[in-house]
Image (cartoon, rainbow, N blue to C red):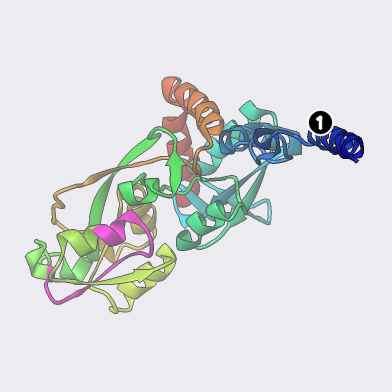
Amino acid sequence: MYKNKMVLSVIMSLALLVSACGTKPAEQTSGNAGSGEQPATATQASKLDAIKKAGKIIVGTSADYPPYEFHKEIDKKDQIVGFDIEIAKEIAKDLGVTLEMKDMKFEGLLPALEAGNIDFIISGMTPTPERQKSVDFTKIYYTAVQRVVVRADDKAKYTTVDSLKGQKVGAQKGATQETIVKEQMPGSEVKAIGKITDLIMEMKTKKIEALVVEQPVADAFLQKNPDLVYADIKLTTEDSGSAIAVKKDSTDLVEAMNKTLDRLISDKSIDKFVTEANALVEQ
């Protein structure tokens, strides 16, 4: 009886040993090591490779912001043009991929990027601390001055920030200018609208009394609307730079884009693109 118990004990021990040999150690079955999942950093670092493998890169823009990006009929065909678009083309060329454009309202750009519907944003976007919480930015590629636009008949009436107290001031919804109005014109009521063209119409129909906008953009519209002029109003923070936005932690993509921007800044190509875009606006 004792011998039978000994034999049974040996058999059970062997069975447990065989079973243990067929089981992977716990660390090998974790999501970061033994499964099909990649560590987060490896997945994020592959963004550039994924774009090159797809053979295309998708840019999101809001094409109502001349000379940055705007619609223009060329050879009887509606096209999106502007100096931002020329920069995007150069990035695609340097990456060896084709460029696909998606036009949408400015406030929809960041959600589209975070959802993965576009690969990057180039739309005169300022890399504010708030935006940097959700996306990454390249270096600044262009800096413009913020200006206040009023109707020509009201130029003598609106000469200071205080003179606009109690009045409606327009700004592009979701853009830096909306924040400027809220912070630097607290006595005014901000009216935020997605398209600059709609804001210009609000000015002309006297639904707003002033408009805060970047100077290159304002120049483009003032050339076509002589009834609008710059007010002699100084904003405390007039300069704001534009940068390209990409999905958070896309380090390799940011580095690649910065190389293109370095080249375009160094050889003065961006200045050339701005001049050409302004000329298109005037045509």
**280 vs 170, nearest the viewer:** 170
**200 vs 279, nearest the viewer:** 200
Query: What range of the chain is rendered magenta?
Result: 164-179
**201 vs 254, nearest the viewer:** 254
Left or right of 151? Residue 193 is right
Mark 1 element type: helix
Q: Residue shown at 45%/32% (left/top)?
A: 270
Q: Quadrant of residue 43?
A: top right
**159 vs 178, nearest the viewer:** 178
Left or right of 124? Residue 171 is left
Q: Compared with residue 243, is residue 192 higher up or lower down, i.e. above or below?
A: below
Q: Compared with residue 15, is residue 209 higher up or lower down, i.e. above or below?
A: below
Q: Is residue 50 magenta?
A: no
Q: Quadrant of the N terminus?
A: top right
Residue 221 horizontal/vertical position (percent)? 38, 58
Q: How many C-alpha atoms fall within 10 Å of the one at disc 1: few (<14), some, or many (≥20)?
A: few
Q: Residue shown at 42%/47% (left/top)?
A: 124
Residue 163 horizontal/vertical position (percent)? 8, 68
Residue 92 horizontal/vertical position (percent)? 63, 34
